[in-house]
Amino acid sequence: MKTWFITGASRGFGARIAQLALERGDNVVATARSAGSVTEKLGERRNLLAAALDVTNEEQARDAARQAVERFGAIDVLLNNAGFGLIGAVEEASAEEVERLYRTNVFGLLTVTRAVLPQMRSQRFGRILNVSSIGGYRAGAGFGVYCSTKFAVEGLSEALHAELEPLGIHVTVIEPGYFRTDFLDPSSLSSSGNRISDYDGTAGAVREHASSLNHNQPGDPEKFARQIVAFADVAQPPVRMPFGSDTVAAIEAKHLSDGDIIKRWREVSVSTDF
């Protein structure tokens, strides 16, 4: 039996993973900005602690971690799932939109991780699963600012993996592709208010494509949720774990593209050594 600490647990991936963990008998600390929204979604159970948590609030994060340990004695799995998207060209994004995105997707993840790590270090075991995206491995027009937050999650996760593995804590960055969730709905995906006509053929086209893709994505969220719950039991988890054929294809394509860059520009690249 494990104790999970899940952010963004009132809907989407977070809610379904929490539900599956509860059903198999695990303890779950399910957090969202409103604890009531968690209870409304998951009900009231002896192995469930619904906690109010705005991931950008450091005091709330520490309090939720304290409640988790008081109630269940440990935190075995931290699932940093809270986050949202922003669509629009990089130039179109306002400073306020960029800052809001980073507050949740990057600084929020750091805030919750810092709140939970003292407990994991003291118990000398734990799993941290940081939800990134296909956009955390390769960026594209229309999602530049969002992808930059997920690139940050990837870098933080790689460093945490190296720092925490000697302490018995395994860190994996989770890279889902397009799954048939509400991520492309306005509730999860903001759109830059500014529109620049010069980007109509790139970021603008992506805006239009995103609406047509909504609820037609190739990934099955139920299968993803079940894989995440099972993945928490893997003895030696990898530093990154892609999910979805589209993510695998994107990673393979980037490897080929980067390999071609190295092949074509190797002499220039290595010429700068002493």
Image: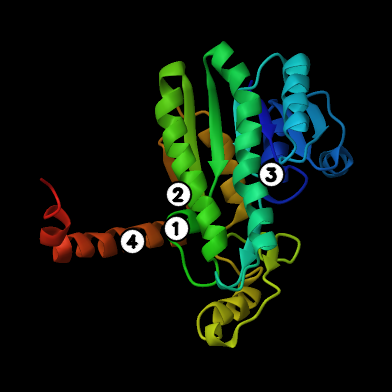
> How far separated are the C-alphas under marks 2 and 4?
14 Å
Q: Which residue is mark 3?
A: 14
Residue 254's disc number: 4
Screen quadrant of the N terminus: top right
Instruction: Residue at 64% x, 25% y: name it.
Output: 116
Q: Which residue is mark 1?
A: 247
Name the foreground residue: 153 vs 71.
Answer: 153
Label 4: few (<14), some (14–19) or many (≥20) C-alpha neighbours in 10 Å: some
Screen quadrant of the C terminus: top left
Task: Relative to 165, say whether 248 is above or below.
Answer: below
> How far separated are the C-alphas under marks 1 and 2?
6 Å
Label 3: few (<14), some (14–19) or many (≥20) C-alpha neighbours in 10 Å: many
Q: Position of residue 173 (x, y in %)?
A: 49, 42
Residue type at mark 1 is Thr
Query: N-terminal of the two: label 1 or label 2?
Result: 2
Residue type at mark 3 is Gly
Query: N-terminal of the two: label 1 or label 3?
Result: 3
Query: N-terminal of the two: label 3 or label 4?
Result: 3
Q: State the SS at label 4.
A: helix
Q: Which residue is mark 2?
A: 242
Query: N-terminal of the two: label 2 or label 4?
Result: 2
Instruction: Residue at 63% x, 78% y: name it.
Output: 212
> How far separated are the C-alphas under marks 3 and 4?
29 Å
Could you tell me if the residues under marks 1 and 3 are in contact, i.e. CB atoms within 8 Å?
Answer: no
Could you tell me if the residues under marks 1 and 2 are in contact, i.e. CB atoms within 8 Å?
Answer: yes
Residue type at mark 2 is Pro
Q: State the SS at label 2.
A: strand
Name the foreground residue: 13 vs 121.
Answer: 121
Location of residue 204 (image quadrant): bottom right
